[in-house]
Amino acid sequence: MNKIRCIQVFILLLVVAFAGCKSKTGSEQAAGVFVPGEIWPDDKGVHINAHGGGILHVGDMYYWFGEHKTEGVAGNSAQVGVHCYSSKDLYNWKDEGIALSVVTDDSTHSIAKGCILERPKVIYNKKNNNYVMWFHLEPKGAGYTGALSGIAVSDRVTGPYTFLRAVRPNAGYWPVNVLDVHKKGVPESARRHFSGGDLPAHPDSLNILGRDMEGGQMARDMNLFVDDDGNAYHIYSSEENSTLQISLLTDDYTCYSGTYARFFPGRFMEAPAMFKRNGKYYLIMSGCTGWAPNAGRSAVASSIWGPWEELKNPFVGAGADVSFHSQSTYVLPVPGKPDQFIYMGDRWTPDNAIDGRYIWLPVRFEGDQPVIEWHDKWSFL
């Protein structure tokens, strides 16, 4: 066999081996088995592209919205928009296309191609019978200094969504748990932007809250939560990431109501995911270490307005100190399966954004403490 023929045979064997591995993982998902961290093919055989996402349940269908990533480092910014997939069983997903597209013909637009558009979430608004999308937005070329919230709406769950506005939260309003120190002026040392991972002093002594009161609070990593009474809330990292804020939205879910509160000042909580169990509210979060994973965090409260009690790292076992190399994006209460919840996390790959994987794992409880253990494969059926 000549040298060229040997090379051709070798390449063929590699292709067959890769296809076999891909087919095996895909067939396991199709058979009703989650395989965390592996390639997750959609109905077209392409790895699902919905990073930093969340789930909306409508009728008998689940809709997964997330960031559409592209190859390379450039894929960490928004080159395409928000991708949507649909499923009836959470294992097998149909590509529904791009729900919200970035703007390609106006580089000054809030969601111009190349902006940073992260953690999109969609909720249904009964009042207007429409769907409302929120996301963390940074204008093109501004790094992470914008700390804006983007809002878009659609009459169809899969879109297309129409961009409404980009704002900072609650401009001109104090939180319900404002402290006296926040109304006593802002030191000059606070009148600049910081790294997002630490501060030279406690956020209350720097009065980051007071600094941003007139122009609106900062909002980065975020999530949405709709309570049993229909009230919707925006949960986000604020005050240079040092403090978590929770805001009540207006009844059409497209604006801030001006009612909000701040929690965990100085704890630098990112990637908040809120859910409710047996009348109590829970949060699963991370610390602030950029793209690098860290130990997870959790908290519980009897009221969404607190007080919130910080609990332990919900991850247990080998790899718990880095949340199994993931970061929280959503916790899904499984409809029709009481007391079953799915942790949804992202395994980021910033050097080649499109390669990111998904870590979905079951959440169990020890008293109030959520517990997440690693499973190579699992099913809730």
Image (cartoon, rainbow, N blue to C red):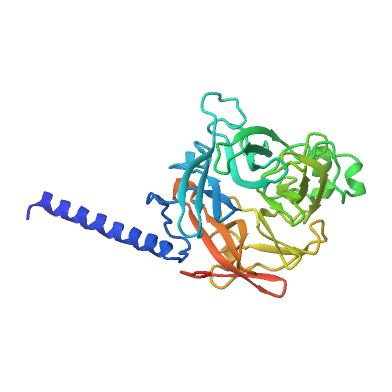
Q: Please state if 22 lies on the left or on the right of 287 as rendered.
A: left
Rendered view: 257 above or below 329: above
354 relative to 322 in the view: left or right = left
User: Which corner quadrant of the image does residue 1 belong to?
Assistant: bottom left
Q: Does 278 sit above or below residue 348? A: below
Residue sticking out furthest to the bottom: 366
Image check: 260 left or right of 270? right
Taking the spot 74% from the left edge, 41% from the top edge, the residue there is: 252
Residue 326: x, y in percent?
55, 59
Please give the name of the residue rendered at 45% of the width and 41% of the height, measured from the top-left corner. Answer: 70
x, y percent for residue 258: 82, 42
- Name the residue at the left extreme: 1
Residue at figure coordinates x 68%, y 39% from the top left: 149
Instruction: From the top left corner, tell me how far across and down residue 220 is, in percent.
Output: 67, 44
| Nearer to the camera, 205 or 302 | 302
Q: How many labels were placed on the picture?
A: 0
Toward the viewer: 205 or 294?
A: 294
